[in-house]
Every structure is written in structure tokens, then in C-alpha cells.
Image (cartoon, rainbow, N blue to C red):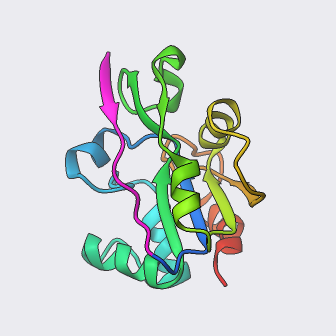
Amino acid sequence: MTTVHSFAPIVDVSAHSLILGSMPGIASLDAGEYYAHSRNAFWPIMGALFDAGPSIPYEQRTSILTTNGIAVWDVLKLCTRHGSLDSAIVESSIDTNDLAGLLDEHRSIERIFFNGAKAENSFQRYVAPLPRTLTTVRLPSTSPAHASLSFERKLDAWRVIAP
């Protein structure tokens, strides 16, 4: 078992929507980048929606997201797990990020989109309620472990984040 730590949020003053994952996987932690696994659909979806696809440098992708009002973070600040799967997270080890603080600092955020069930369930169990009312939507996980949906079906579901 390894204790893993999430990254700082990708956010700026223009953010209106926050995408919350659970915890970066091993490939992301090794690269120091959100959604770095080559089979994760996150960046291909961002490419289809905002021209922020995996073929361009990471800093440019994140800049495109913030320019479009999209922030990215994780519900979990740290946890213990073996491997990358959300199902391997030891529940008793969970510590959450300061989402209330982020939302207080970025009052323009009106919507939270959960990247999969684990992010939403962890938010509901360990974070909610928030100090203000926001629209929340669970989207299908972009993880390669969530292979029951095709890329096209995931993309169709994720279209709700685009203006």
C-alpha cells in the first residue's frame, strides 16, 4: 500500500465549472499531470470539446481549459491504495481537499462535474454539504478501467460541460 497525494487545482478567476476526479492514478502521479494515462479519455474528450487534446503540451491544454472557464481538481487530497484503481482506495485513509475553500475563493464556479462515481460518492460522503448551492452532475468516468462505455458515448455525456 502506498500513500498518494493529489495535485494542486487547475483554476483561475474565470472558472465557472469545476471537474472533480477522485485521485490521480500512477501514470498521472509519475508524470505530474492530471489524466496522463494514455488510455484515459479525459484529454481526448477535452480535445473534442475545447481543442485541448493530448497532442498539444500539457501546459497549453490546461491553459485552454482555464480560458474556457473550466477548473480541474480532485476530491481526495491523499489516501492509501495499491495501484491506480479507485476500488483499491482504503476508505479509512482518505483526507479531502479543501473544496469549500476553493469555492469560497472562486465564487464564479457554479457547476461541479464529477468524473465518475468514486469522485461523486467521496464528495457526498466526506465533503458535502457545501456553503452554497451549486449544480452537480456525475459524468461517466474517463478512466480506462471504465470500459463499458465507448469513447463516443462518454463524449456525448461530457458535452454538458461545454458552453
Q: Could you tell whether 115 is left or right of 28 in the image?
A: right
Q: Is residue 161 visible?
A: yes
Which image quarter is the N terminus in? Answer: top left
Image point 61% across, 37% down: which residue? 118
Residue sitting nearer the eye, 138 or 66: 66
Please, is residue 160 above or below residue 42 in the view? Answer: below
Please, is residue 102 above or below residue 85 in the view? Answer: below
Q: Is residue 142 visible?
A: no
Please, is residue 79 above or below residue 52 in the view? Answer: above
What segment carries the magenta color? 1-12
Q: Position of residue 135 (x, y in %)?
A: 77, 62
Image point 22% across, 52% down: which residue? 31
The question of residue 2 being in magenta is answered with yes
Which image quarter is the C terminus in? Answer: bottom right
Query: Which quarter of the picture shows residue 123?
Result: top right
Residue sitting nearer the eye, 119 or 54: 119
Query: Which quarter of the picture shows residue 162?
Result: bottom right
Image point 34% across, 71% down: which residue? 54
Q: Could you tell whether 132 is left or right of 162 in the image?
A: right
The question of residue 123 being in magenta is answered with no
Q: Position of residue 152 (x, y in %)?
A: 63, 67
Residue sitting nearer the eye, 122 or 116: 122
**SS majority, magenta:** loop
Query: Which quarter of the picture shows residue 142?
Result: bottom right
Q: Position of residue 102 (x, y in %)?
A: 51, 57
Image point 46% across, 69% down: which residue? 44
Q: Position of residue 146 (x, y in %)?
A: 57, 43
